[in-house]
Image: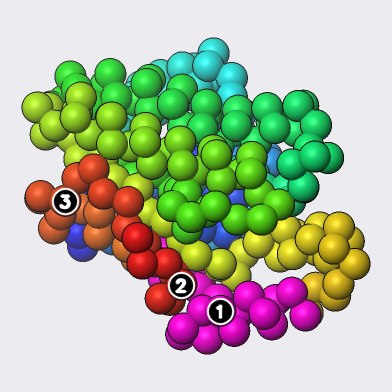
C-alpha cells in the first residue's frame, strides 16, 4: 500500500473525481478526509464507499465551503486534532457554467473564480503551514485541459483553471525547500456528474441536443472516449505517494490525447 498511514484531505469529494480519488487513496492505505459543500452526498460517499474499504472508522468527512477561510481553518484544526498531521492535500472542489462572454454576469464570473481559484489558494495557504512544520507533504491541484487551452463559452472557467496552474507553479517554488511537492493534473472531458451537467447547460444554451454535443466531444478525443474518474484518481495517487520523489511544479495532461501542451 503506497499511502499506508498517510492523512489525505480531498476537497470536492462527494462525487466525481474527488470521490474516486478518495476511494483509490483509501485502498492504498491512506486515512482519507472527505470535504464538500454538499453534506448529503458527502455523507453518502463516505458511508457507502470509504467505510466499506476500511471496515472501521479510519477517516472522516466535513461539510466545507472552500471560499470560507474561517471554515477552512476550523476544518483543518479538527483534522490535525484527530490525526496530528496532513500529508496530502487534493484541491478538487470546482464548479463550471458555460456562458458567452457578452452575456456573462459579474456575479457568475466571481462565483467560478471564488470556488475554483480562490478556494484553492485559501485551503492551500492553511494546510501548507502545517506541511512546512512537518517538512514534508504532497499537494495536487485538479486543473483542467481548459487550464492550458481556452474554450468557447468558458472564459470564466478557463481563467480560473489557468490561474490554478500558475498558482501551482508559484507554490512549488515556495514549498520545495520543505520537501513538499506541488503538482496540477489537467483532466480532459471526464464521465462525471459535473461534466454531464455542463453538457446539459450547453444543450440549452446552444439549442443542440446533449447527445450531439457529447458525440462531437468524443470524436475530438483521439482515444475516442471520456475519461473515467478512476483513471484521473490513479494519477493523483501516484503524484501524492512516495513513489513520486522528483516531479513538482508540473501540470500533467490526462486527456486521451486531446491536449498536448
- Look at mark 2 in the image and give the residue it sits on: 258
Report the residue marked by disc 3: 247
Q: Secondary structure at mark 2?
A: loop
Q: Quadrant of the C terminus?
A: bottom left
As measured in the structure, the alpha-carbon distance from the residue carrying label 2 to the one carrying label 3 is 22 Å
Q: Quadrant of the N terminus?
A: bottom left
Task: Residue at 85% x, 75% y: name it.
Answer: 209
Using the rendered view, name the quadrant where residue 170 is placed.
top left
- Residue at image coords 35%, 48%: 184
Task: Name the residue rendered at 77%, 47% in the picture.
Answer: 100
Task: Give whichever of discs 2 and 3 has the lower sequence position.
Answer: 3
C-beta proximity under 8 Å, tags 1 and 2: yes
248 up-or-down from 75: above or below = below
Q: CA distance from mark 1 to mark 2?
A: 7 Å
Of residues 230 and 42, the one nearer the viewer is 230
Q: Viewed as shown, does residue 38 lie left or right of 105? A: left
Instruction: Give the SS element for disc 1.
Output: loop
166 or 8, which lies in front? 166
- Tell me the magenta residue range: 212-233
Label 2: how many residues lie within 10 Å, few (<14), some (14-19) or many (20+)?
some
Question: Which numbered dot is residue 220?
Answer: 1
Amino acid at each position: 500500500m503506497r499511502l499506508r498511514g498517510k492523512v489525505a484531505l480531498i476537497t470536492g469529494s462527494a462525487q466525481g473525481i474527488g470521490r474516486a480519488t478518495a476511494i483509490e487513496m483509501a485502498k492504498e492505505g491512506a486515512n482519507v478526509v472527505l470535504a464538500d459543500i454538499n453534506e448529503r452526498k458527502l455523507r453518502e460517499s463516505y458511508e457507502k464507499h470509504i467505510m466499506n474499504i476500511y471496515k472501521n472508522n479510519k477517516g472522516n468527512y466535513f461539510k466545507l465551503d472552500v471560499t470560507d477561510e474561517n471554515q477552512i481553518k476550523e476544518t483543518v484544526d479538527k483534522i490535525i486534532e484527530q490525526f496530528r498531521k496532513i500529508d496530502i492535500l487534493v484541491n478538487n472542489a470546482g464548479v463550471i457554467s458555460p456562458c458567452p462572454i457578452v452575456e456573462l454576469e459579474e456575479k457568475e464570473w466571481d462565483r467560478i473564480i471564488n470556488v475554483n481559484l480562490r478556494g484553492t489558494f485559501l485551503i492551500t495557504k492553511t494546510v501548507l503551514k502545517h506541511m512546512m512544520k512537518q517538512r514534508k507533504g504532497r499537494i495536487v491541484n485538479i486543473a483542467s485541459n481548459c487550464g492550458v487551452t481556452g474554450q468557447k463559452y468558458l472564459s470564466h472557467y478557463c481563467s480560473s483553471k489557468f490561474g490554478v496552474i500558475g498558482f501551482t507553479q508559484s507554490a512549488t517554488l515556495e514549498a520545495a525547500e520543505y520537501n513538499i511537492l506541488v503538482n496540477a493534473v489537467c483532466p480532459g472531458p471526464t464521465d462525471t456528474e459535473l461534466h454531464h451537467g455542463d453538457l446539459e447547460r450547453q444543450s440549452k444554451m446552444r439549442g443542440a441536443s446533449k447527445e450531439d454535443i457529447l458525440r462531437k466531444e468524443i470524436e475530438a478525443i483521439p482515444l475516442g472516449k471520456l475519461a473515467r474518474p478512476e483513471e484521473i484518481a490513479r494519477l493523483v495517487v501516484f503524484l501524492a505517494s512516495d513513489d513520486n520523489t522528483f516531479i513538482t511544479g508540473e501540470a500533467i495532461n490526462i486527456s486521451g490525447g486531446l491536449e498536448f501542451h
